[in-house]
Image (cartoon, rainbow, N blue to C red):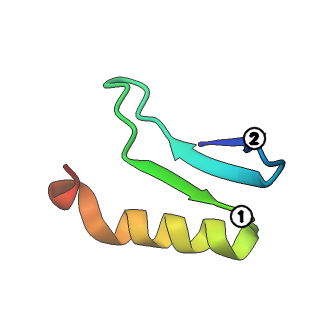
Amino acid sequence: MDFVHDRLAKGRRFKCVTMTELCSKEVPVIEVDNSIGGEHVCRILDRFFAEGPCRRS
């Protein structure tokens, strides 16, 4: 899991949460928003684990 942040040309900030599978180098989760706090990260992880490995493509 990694957090990335940057600014748009007009100065507005955005953040990304990415999760990369180390063996396959697949990125099953990329979440982009203006603000990503702890509760938001928990919702992302809950959704990721609720889908299960069989339903991820």
Horizontal placement of 55 versus 42: left or right? left
User: Would residue 37 appear left or right of 52 to someone viewing this image?
Assistant: right
Residue 30: x percent and y percent? 48, 49
| Of 18 and 32, the residue lying toward us | 32
Position in image of residue 3 (x %, y %) = 69, 44
Residue at 60 percent across and 50 percent down: it is 17
Position of residue 28 relative to residue 44, above or below, is above
Work out whether mark 2 precedes mark 1 in sequence or the reverse, and give the earlier one. 2
Residue at (71%, 64%) from the top-left corner?
36
Which x, y percent locates residue 28?
37, 46
Toward the right, the furthest residue is 11
Left or right? Give the position of 22 relative to 24.
right
Q: What kind of residue is marked 2?
A: Ala
| Label 2 – label 1 distance at C-alpha | 20 Å
- Local crowd size for mark 1, using a 10 Å CA cut-off: few (<14), some (14–19), many (≥20): some
Q: Quadrant of the N terminus?
A: top right
Q: Amino acid at mark 1?
A: Ile
Point out the residue furthest to the left here: 54
- The residue at which mark 1 appears reads as 36
Q: Residue at x 51, y 64 (%)?
A: 45
Q: State the residue position of label 2.
A: 9
